[in-house]
Image (cartoon, rainbow, N blue to C red):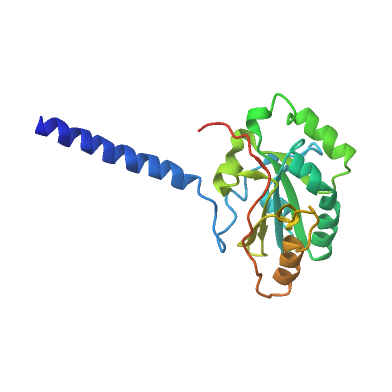
Amino acid sequence: MKKIIIGVLGLAIVAFFAFKGEGDKHTDIALGDKAPKAELEMKNTNGEMASLQSEKGENGLLVVFSCNTCPFVIAWEDQYPELYELCAANNVGMIAINSNEAKRDGDDSWKAMKVKAKADKYQFAYVVDTDSELAYAFGATRTPHIYLFDGDMKLTFKGAINDKYENKTKTAGKHYLKDAIGKMVNGEKIDPAITKPMGCTIKKVKV
């Protein structure tokens, strides 16, 4: 009996650390971390291939985990063109990533993405994250989920675009991302550098 108990405890300990390791693999990247899988090529809605590295500007890269139909994305995406212009003016690249692999046969299909990018006149890359690979590497969980990298591709800000959904009026009073871009390119401290992402869960595939 004693040997059986010890054996069961041993298996429990192994299972605990195996589970812990799997969770760590999908942990959200931290401030100062380099952008993961920066060379990973993904299909862009313009018919070409794109990667984080290819879309990076001299002063950095704005990564937006987005999609086609999430109500939070719809409520925020009117700011995408303005964010793109702000990034372009500051030599910061911008890329939107659709990681909803579990909905690839529906609203977030490749065909639907191309229609959306054309209809909304996206000037930035809008790419397919096959098997949710990049979302897992980042630890991204929401749409939209924002990550801002500097010229060395080190993370300087992550979270929400602004405080729109923290206010009862649903009107933004604090423009986290815009402030972060300005401070980053000017070499100033970003505060806050981490905000809570608000949005729909990314519909990842199980790995």
User: Left of 82 or right of it: where is 188?
Assistant: left
Q: Is residue 31 above or below residue 44?
A: below
Dividing the picture into quadrants, the one containing residue 115 is top right
Q: Is residue 33 above or below residue 77?
A: below
Residue at left offset 83%, top offset 36%: 116
Outermost residue toward the top in this view: 105
User: Left of 98 or right of it: where is 33?
Assistant: left
Residue at left offset 45%, top offset 44%: 23
Residue at left offset 74%, top offset 65%: 181
| Residue closest to the eye, 55 or 118 | 118
Dividing the picture into quadrants, the one containing residue 194 is bottom right
Q: Is residue 173 above or below residue 1?
A: below
User: Left of 101 or right of it: where is 46?
Assistant: right
Q: How many marks?
A: 0
Residue 42: percent from the left, percent from the top?
A: 68, 40
Residue 184: percent from the left, percent from the top?
A: 70, 69
User: Left of 22 or right of it: where is 112?
Assistant: right
Residue 80: percent from the left, percent from the top?
A: 82, 51
Dividing the picture into quadrants, the one containing residue 188 is bottom right
Query: In the rendered image, which quarter contains the N terminus?
Result: top left
Residue 11: percent from the left, percent from the top?
A: 25, 35
| Residue closest to the eye, 51 or 15 | 15
Residue at left offset 85%, top offset 56%: 82
Outermost residue toward the left in this view: 2
Q: Is residue 201 above or below residue 110?
A: below
